Image (tube, rainbow, N blue to C red):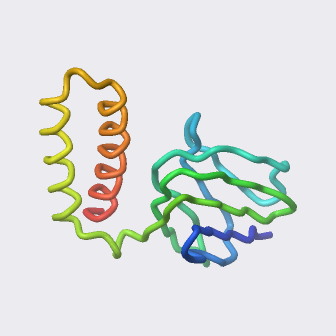
């Protein structure tokens, strides 16, 4: 048995394939999905969506959104998705340095600190995926 995986963003259909399993970065931690999974709707965080297609492990980075599982069809509605090979690792590392510099200087605006921490998580995920 297999699952149908669709990863959709506002600008593209990033993945549309059959997989045997997947793990997604849920807002409350990693969530795994196998065939015959119960109907489910969950919020996603920034992180790696890992899946097995034809015996090969693959991954795509998702930047938030939702995961829906219905009748062996997993639909990921992501704010943004990118494959590791699409990432410039040096640029991602430069983003980490820039964000860390801004965090070191920002002491007053808690909203800005929260925003920077979100940006840092994205940059770290991108850098990790590019170097893997």
Say if 129 sits above or below 13 in the image.
above
Residue drawn 58% across and 68% down? 10
Drawn side of residue 132 relative to residue 60, left or right: left
| Foreground of the two, 21 or 118 | 118
What count of labels does the image hold? 0
Say if 74 sits above or below 11 in the image.
above
Pinpoint residue 1: horizontal percent, then vertical percent. Answer: 80, 69
Pinpoint residue 7: horizontal percent, then vertical percent. Answer: 61, 68
The C terminus, quarter of image: bottom left
Drawn side of residue 9 relative to residue 80, left or right: right
Pinpoint residue 31: horizontal percent, then vertical percent. Answer: 63, 45
Give the farthest residue toward the top: 108
Residue drawn 33% across and 58% down? 126
| Foreground of the two, 43 or 69 | 43
Image quarter for residue 104?
A: top left
Pinpoint residue 25: horizontal percent, then vertical percent. Answer: 54, 47
Drawn side of residue 20 relative to residue 78, left or right: right
Residue drawn 69% across and 44% down? 42
| Foreground of the two, 38 or 118 | 118
């Amino acid at each position: 048995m297999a699952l149908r995986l669709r990863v959709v963003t506002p600008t593209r259909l990033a993945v549309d394939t059959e997989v045997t399993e997947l793990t997604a970065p849920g807002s409350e931690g990693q969530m795994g999905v196998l065939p015959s999974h119960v109907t489910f709707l969950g919020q996603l965080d920034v992180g790696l969506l890992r899946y097995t297609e034809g015996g090969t492990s693959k991954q795509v980075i998702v930047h938030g959104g939702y995961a829906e599982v219905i009748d062996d069809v997993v639909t990921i509605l992501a704010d943004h998705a990118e494959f590791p090979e699409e990432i410039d690792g040096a640029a991602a590392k430069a983003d980490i340095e820039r964000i860390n510099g801004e965090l070191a200087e920002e002491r007053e605006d808690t909203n800005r600190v929260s925003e920077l921490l979100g940006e840092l998580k994205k940059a770290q995920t991108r850098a990790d995926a590019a170097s893997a």
